[in-house]
Image (cartoon, grey):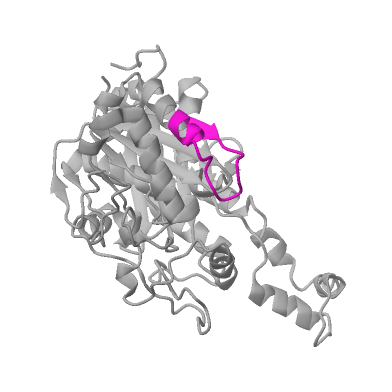
Amino acid sequence: MTHDRQGRPLVAVTGMGVVTSLGRGQSENWAALTAGRSGIHAINRFPTEGLRTRIAGTVDFVAVEPFCAPMLSERLAILAAEEAVAEAGTGAKGDFPGPLFIAVPPVEMEWPQREALAAASGQTDAITYADLLKGAATGRFRAWHDLFLFGTVADRVAERFGTKGSPISLSTACSSGATAIQLGVEAIRRGETQAALCIGTDGSVNPESLIRFSLLSALSTQNDPPEGAAKPFSRNRDGFVMGEGAAALVLESAEAARARGARILGYVLGCGERGDGFHRTRSSPDGAPIIAAIREAIEDAGLTPDDIDYVNAHGTGTPENDKMESLGCMAVMGERMKRVPISSNKSMVGHTLTAAGAVEAVFSLLTIAKGRIPPTINHAVPDPAIPLDVVPNTARDAQVNVVLSNSFGFGGQNTCLVFGAEPR
């Protein structure tokens, strides 16, 4: 089969790559994930004295210079894409036969650079915006202009892999990685391309982002032990833990992939997306946008809720998100949802933010391929308001043919993807 039930080109996955705090590559990540090992630890990248949250799933084994979110995000994206493109074996090196869709974190100049600009202005205290402009006018920091542009990461990744056309940078909060995949799927379905490189990347654990999420009361403050802080779906959950990482998927039309004899790792069967303008951080109380996104993804796949074998949860560990995700899944799948396994990778890798949807897409496809469901660790205190099978603490062997992967972001960005071992 090369087309889905709606007559659209079927979208196959022929290459995957992933980097998280658990390690580099599919093998390292999968071994740690199914062993229930956490990559969350005390932050040593910058001083955390006096901060309420002092832990994160930082990727400390990847070094960049100068150290900043754009540089680390770029490096993580390249590592993930190298693995994915090599596995896919499509095109020549540096000549990828399709466009790039990449989810990157919001970019702004960070504190070390601001301090350098202030010093260049000649002022020592009471620094104003005009002083920063004066520092910039010296011309000594022109390289920073490119470094801190939103599209720079995409431009550099596109140049390295030789993708076609203008690269698309996107940021839809915590659904970004899933949205990048959705854009690739839609481009192939429309016949605009036979292949797409889709990436989600985030290396933005820095003082500014940590403090801002803390001020939103979104982060866990249970710093000791760090590996026990992320507790999705537990009654004693108190917030998410920031994480870093990247994942890349090579998507191809099934027809093109089969014509060149590629090994197909799975299929992106359906995509669903709904916006929610209720609140900057909270979901609509009736869960309508989340419910609509889940339903749309399943319907777009030409399936019914009964076809879902496993849900890779957004599962951040915040009181609000986990409650609303449970409500949404129950509304779509009814009482059967109590028997459908649902687990959260964020209990181990933390919340990789812009990268999360792509990272969880790779883990979803590995679940299908390996027949093993990663657990939700740290689940010691079940929440009676969430009557779900969260695969607590220990991985589970199971035949999984269809996975629903949820990504729900601040600002009401809701994107759901359905992956399958083969088309139905």
Q: Position of residue 423 (x, y in %)?
A: 27, 22
Whether the magenta-drawn stretch holds residue 278 is answered as yes
Above or below 223: residue 75: above
State which quarter of the image contains the N terminus: top left
Q: In this orientation, which residue lies closer to the viewer: 400 or 261?
A: 400
Q: Residue furthest left?
A: 397
Q: Position of residue 234 (x, y in %)?
A: 31, 57
Above or below 327: residue 236: below
When asked about the image quadrant of residue 296, the answer is: top left
Does the rendering let one see residue 89?
no
Q: Residue at x 57, y 37 (%)?
A: 276
Left or right, 148 with reference to 243: right
Whether the magenta-drawn stretch holds residue 365 is answered as no
Q: Residue at x 40, y 54 (%)?
A: 316
Does the rendering let one see residue 350?
yes
Region in magenta: 272-292
Q: In this orientation, which residue lies closer to the viewer: 275 or 187?
A: 275
Q: Residue furthest bottom?
A: 124
Left or right, 309 with reference to 49: left
When asked about the image quadrant of residue 215, the answer is: bottom right
Q: Residue at x 38, y 70 (%)?
A: 61
Q: Position of residue 398 (x, y in %)?
A: 13, 40
